[in-house]
Image: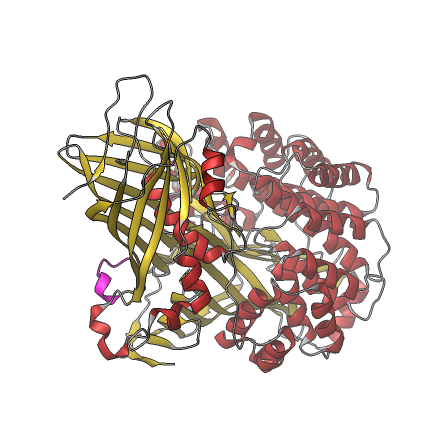
Amino acid sequence: MCCLEMYFHTGSHTTGLSLNNDRLYKLTYSTEVFLDRGKGNLQDSVGYRISSNVDVVLLWRSPDGDDNQLIQITMKDVNVENVNQRRGEKSIFKGKKSSQIIRKENLEAMQRPVLLHLIHGKIKEFYSYQNEPAAIENLKRGLASLFQMQLSSGTTNEVDISGDCKVTYQAQQDKVTKIKALDSCKIERAGFTTPHQVLGVTSKATSVTTYKIEDSFVVAVLSEEIHALRLNFLQSIAGKIVSRQKLELKTTEAGLRLKPGKQVAAIIKAVDSKYTAIPIVGQVFQSKCRGCPSLSEHWQSIRKHLQPDNLSKAEAVRSFLAFVKHLRTAKKEEILQILKAENKEVLPQLVDAVTSAQTPDSLDAILDFLDFKSTESVILQERFLYACAFASHPDEELLRALISKFKGSFGSNDIRESVMIIIGALVRKLCQKEGCKLKGVIEAKKLILGGLEKAEKKEDIMMYLLALKNARLPEGIPLLLKYAETREGPISHLAATTLQRYDVPFITDEVKKTMNRIYHQNRKIHEKTVRTTAAAIILKNNPSYMEVKNILLSIGELPKEMNKYMLSIVQDILRFEMPASKMVRRVLKEMVAHNYDRFSKSGSSSAYTGYVERTSHSASTYSLDILYSGSGILRRSNLNIFQYIEKTPLHGIQVVIEAQGLEALIAATPDEGEENLDSYAGLSALLFDVQLRPVTFFNGYSDLMSKMLSASSDPMSVVKGLLLLIDHSQELQLQSGLKANMDVQGGLAIDITGAMEFSLWYRESKTRVKNRVSVLITGDITVDSSFVKAGLEIGAETEAGLEFISTVQFSQYPFLVCLQMDKEDVPYRQFETKYERLSTGRGYVSRKRKESLIGGCEFPLHQENSDMCKVVFAPQPESSSSGWF
């Protein structure tokens, strides 16, 4: 058997495959692809195999050197078949000829020869015919790329179908191995991802090609490329693509004589003047969607699922995610037409979807549709802004659009405030993507910092502080220190809580000195909420021995409820093994800090942290701290939920209810530093690392009396809508020439409400925070050749509710406190769909579905009752089906 011969040259250059003169090489070629969930059993995969015979002939060799060659490659007898031999009668290819599967015009194009110009074993040019289908040309590029190799070990860059890639050769006596670093490949492909590690994905790609050698001849080329993906916080959302190529030499026979000449261009023209040089790098193509609905038809089919009463169901999120995908291919005019035709009940959900699409057309459409000068569409404006805040991959244009709107006029001042707050969130996200030097980001920074420095009205100062709380600009820290230490009431407290959001490296010694002055009241009297926030900042950011000691020594000298609160904070640090626990334990070895008098302080204020869920690589925690005034009225309750992947946190939810200046209602004496505070109660929420605009229950004594006399305890909406949180899209050019897509989307419908009730008759106050969500996460992996497509869809969905209620009876001291945090029963559903589909419409599908019920529970909120909430799984039987469609 003759082979693809390799001549070993002794010059300074490296050499690769070299063909003999006047010989026709007969080879067999196959490329196959498998899709599965990465469990290792390829027999359970979906996919397909394309195989053919291949003729290779040397047309020309440069008279100046053997390593300058022009070869012709021709695919023949193309066949398409199933990779899963157990499919049997269910194979979509059974009984179909290649011309029916591939289509006649595609098959003719595939079997037209291509020319490959090789110099020293590397591809110089790739020649084909113009106007051939891109998908078919890619398959021929994938075959041609296998002919590029070198014989010596080393690392270099090569250009092939995958792009300009870094490759490493390992030469041995019986084989040469080429390892391609796929993450180094420079190739233009659409894609984006959620930058946050908790909401992001982990992907891994490898490519290894082995050239088998016998007696200095290459007898086979074997290539395997693997792409694996998994969602970080839910690892059941995972998938893998395995793509293989195999090229084997069968025999040789007499072939065409070499064409004489010195210039390769003249040789190509002599072979066929229609040949043209085209890039060897794979080209983008889109398969035509047969029978797919228009945007308007799609919307009409799902709008019933997006009615307000249906938003608590996972089907609402499924419809939302599917429509977002469709919107990304739509034109502005199509989107505007649907927006203008929709009624007010479903329109907010449509605004959520259009904004979440994050394309230039969708942004133009929604900005044309919304009128920020109107007071009638405030709900729509707010939904648009929230969707902007949670944008998975915002760009500078979105930021510029909001800056432009902020400089205009508004019908509602609440919307003006929200625009500035969301500008801060977008600055943070763009900076996380190394976009801090973009002109739009620089302008936004100046707007926030300049506005905060010059603001005189309390409302404007609060607005810019909230924007800075989202942006977390290091250059804003001096301003925050000034406002925290010198201002009164809510402004001082908000400045302190904004500093609390900064990462540890930004909490410098100067910041901690200021926080120490605030907590210990070295320069002026501060209210309890500001002092406790200052203490939290110190204890969270590598506190020194003396800082911890001084805080412990202060317990016993503080107002009554603040004593209990700080004691609970210290005990929570120790019990939950927080970073500061080691230093606290060191200090507690001193009797002056650790004694009965200090640690026996009574009161109802508390702090507690616990686990919602904990695994080897992730954890979900909740914490609740409640601070009361000395008269028993709620001063602040702070509920937090964090999600961790290893050590990376995501602040999922924070709901803070604050009240002040209510002592006069029960003829009580205000605590030190709080004598002149206006009557106020409100709720502030942070959702997935984004601070939202606070809502007010009442502001001022007259407003309070009006609310009390109306006896209304209806909850106020904090945030409501459909959010796109996880958004990963990756288009891959496989070395075989096939196109792959790996997409992960996660969305939720959320409704957070809060209420505060106050009864003078029963001398009782009650706060209630209710959080209802429905969540859907889907992974979609496809491999497309334009005439056959294989896909894997995996997903998980749930509907959940969490309610926190605190009730205080202050008719006597110590007052009675009841704290509840309950989680309802949670249905949890997982599904998997595998399919193979011909472009003619014929297909095979396999579906699996598994359901379980996670029992509800009540979470401990006191250190005296610290048993972890026990979660009970009640699995249901798995269902599966497969068949034709």
As drawn, is 54 to the left or to the right of 298? left
Q: Is residue 431 magenta?
A: no
**Does residue 335 sit above or below 395 in this rendering?**
below
Q: Give the x, y percent position of residue 852.
A: 33, 74
**In the picture, residue 808 is in which quadrant?**
bottom right
Query: Observer-nearest residue: 523 or 443?
Result: 443
- In magenta, the rendered stretch is 35-44
Question: What residue is shown at x 21% (from left), y 61% (from top)?
Answer: 41
Q: Give the x, y percent position of residue 140.
A: 39, 51
Query: Observer-nearest residue: 357 or 511?
Result: 357
**Does residue 742 sit above or below 840 in this rendering?**
above
Query: Observer-nearest residue: 794 or 108?
Result: 108
As drawn, is 576 to the left or to the right of 552? left
Question: What residue is shown at x 69% (from left), y 42% (from top)?
Answer: 492
Count of residue discs:
0
Q: Give the x, y percent position of residue 663.
A: 69, 59
Quadrant, the N terminus: top left
Question: What residue is shown at x 46% (from left), y 65% (from top)?
Answer: 105
**Does residue 840 sit above or below 610 in this rendering?**
below
Question: What residue is shown at x 28% (from left), y 33% (from top)?
Answer: 18
Q: Is residue 36 magenta?
A: yes
Quadrant, the C terminus: bottom left
On the question of residue 607 being in view, the answer is no
Query: Observer-nearest residue: 680 or 44?
Result: 44
On the question of residue 58 being in view, the answer is yes
Q: Give the x, y percent position of residue 521.
A: 64, 34
